[in-house]
Amino acid sequence: MRTGSSHRFTTPPPFLMPRYGRRWGVVVRRVLFAGAVALILAYTLFPFYWAFNGALQPSSRLYVSPADYLPVPPVFDAFREVFANRMFVRGVLNSALVAGGSTLLALAAGSFAAYALGRFRIRGRRVVLALILGMTMFPQISILGAVYSVISRMGLYNTLWGLGLSYMILTLPLTVWVMMNFFKSLPAELEESATVDGATPLQAFWHVLLPLSLPGLATTGLLAFITAWNEYLFALALTVDRKARTVPVVIANYTGNSLHEVPWGAIMAASVTVTLPLVVLVMIFQKRIIAGLTAGAVKG
Amino acid sequence: MSSLQKRNLWAWAFLVPTLAIFLVVGLYPLVQTFLTSLTNARLGSTRAPEFVGLDNYATLLRDREFWVVVLRTVLFTVVSVALEFALGMVIAMIVHSPFRGRGLMRTAMLVPWAIPTVVSARIWSYMLQDTYGVANDLLATRLGLLDSKVAWLAEPTLAFACVVAVEVWKTTPFVALLLLAGLQLIPDEIHEAAEVDGASRGQRFRLLTLPMLKPAILVALIFRTLDALRIFDAVWVMTRGQAGTEMMATYNYRQMIDFQQLGFGSAVSVAIFLLIAVFVVAYVTMLRTERG
């Protein structure tokens, strides 16, 4: 991290801009600016550091006051405990399956819908759009009871299929919305030439538009995956045991072997374990994620 | 059939899978919730539910706890969204000015947003734990700012503040990113021209930046308000709704799942739905007038 006095900047924020003499002003500005950056980073990152610290301390050093701020030497007992916990390992697997499955299904169904809404002028388009946007706005809790009944009646209670199906309410509107904006941004001539050559809209979609929209699909898939991976409420209500419990529920309920003491070391190790893959994803796809998040929002 | 009609038929065919899924997991449950709210259905009961008309709603309107919970959730929403915007604006403006390490900072910002809320709630519970938590360690033991260690998650007002803090920590990056995207749409020339005309920095922020950011602000405001109103995860994991932190969604969950009152719980669901719908309508109207 380079937060020295060597920042080059053109338009620093106004609230950091006291009017001092020229040269001193520049120095003061740079120090203030670096300080603000450091403060923000500390605020965002310290909780993660503390989780790491808790996960890497031996359990004897976890419950001491004053607390130990450096895990030196690091001890991996907590990680060993978590990975030996069948509930947790199965939870990670369940989460990966449910999030992956509902993302794929949302992409498959949603990209067709996005194509129809983004590139056709059909009657009722606005109604369908309002319906889809409405889905993202109403609270999950207000359909929980009924989703529970639907899933139970289909015989899908406490199954990955049932949970994955319920996640469509979260991942599908998102997919349609982001992909629709993506399709809209492609030039109109693209399928026109294909249709003139006698291709059906399905062929035009499959051979012309879809290959071009792989970046869009990647962004959307990533957003949908993160949403499903993080979901807690439905997972809590629609699953009951190891067969279908996902990792957020496992971490929320983690009690370990001891009844009286909260096993913070193991909980932090579990938290770090599910956070790391997301950090890697965010680092690789940072630009894509930001583009996807802001695409619908800024253009509207 | 004309070619245009054929084309439209294709479009509707493309919409069928999505609409079918929405019907099963969205629309049908919504209607079902409303119908169940008119009965005395219980979860896991074999007895057929009886129609009770608006009884559940009458009970709900007289339930003091429900109104307390509604007011608390609105208060939570106002406080946390205000903080997120104040902080988010500062962060967005800092990240907007080019400096080395900016990419790294953007990644760091995305991480709290990307991790499960359950995980962030667990990490914060660990930090706020009363005997060995780092919050007490820093504030009481090391810096001596507090006379004694504090039970952060057990005292009513404090616990509420802690839930706000966790939510603000997790979602400020999202707000900052939306605002940042808005800032990047404002051409530099406008600021330069204003500077030449002698506008001070404060004036430029107030008269140029803020009005031009308005669409981005409105959209971020809608997303965040709706999310804050339905808060569940952080509360359920950190306090189970104890110590004055019960919100609409946790109250609803308790009635419906824990107490198995499916009928009454559904009435709560419908009430929450209507309440949030009021916000949606208000915001959509605001957006409409904004865009002319």
Image (spheres, rainbow, N blue to C red):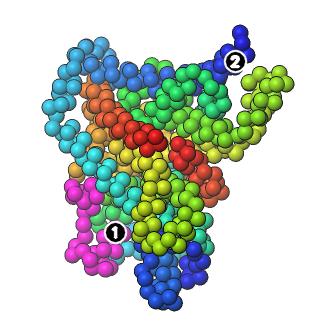
Q: Position of residue A181 (x, y in %)?
A: 61, 39
Disc 2 + disc 1, Cβ < 8 Å:
no
Residue B154 part of the magenta-drawn span? yes
- Name the residue furthest top: B1
Pointer 2 local density, CA inside 10 Å: few below 14, some 14–19, many at least 20: few
Q: Position of residue B187 (x, y in %)?
A: 58, 60
The answer to which of marks 2 and 1 sits earlier in the sequence is 2
Residue A52 part of the magenta-drawn span? no
| Quadrant for the N terminus of chain B in the image | top right
Residue at the spot of label 2? B4
Q: Position of residue B49 (x, y in %)?
A: 28, 15
Left or right of B231 in this view: B190 = right
Q: Nearer the viewer, residue A231 or A125?
A: A125
Left or right of B157 in this view: A115 = right
Q: Is residue A279 above or below residue B72?
A: below
The amino acid on which the numbered mark 1 sits, given as a three-letter code, is Ala
Residue at the spot of label 1? B135
Q: Identify the magenta region.
A: B133-161
Residue B163 in sight here: no
The amino acid on which the numbered mark 2 sits, given as a three-letter code, is Leu
Q: Position of residue B5 (x, y in %)?
A: 67, 15
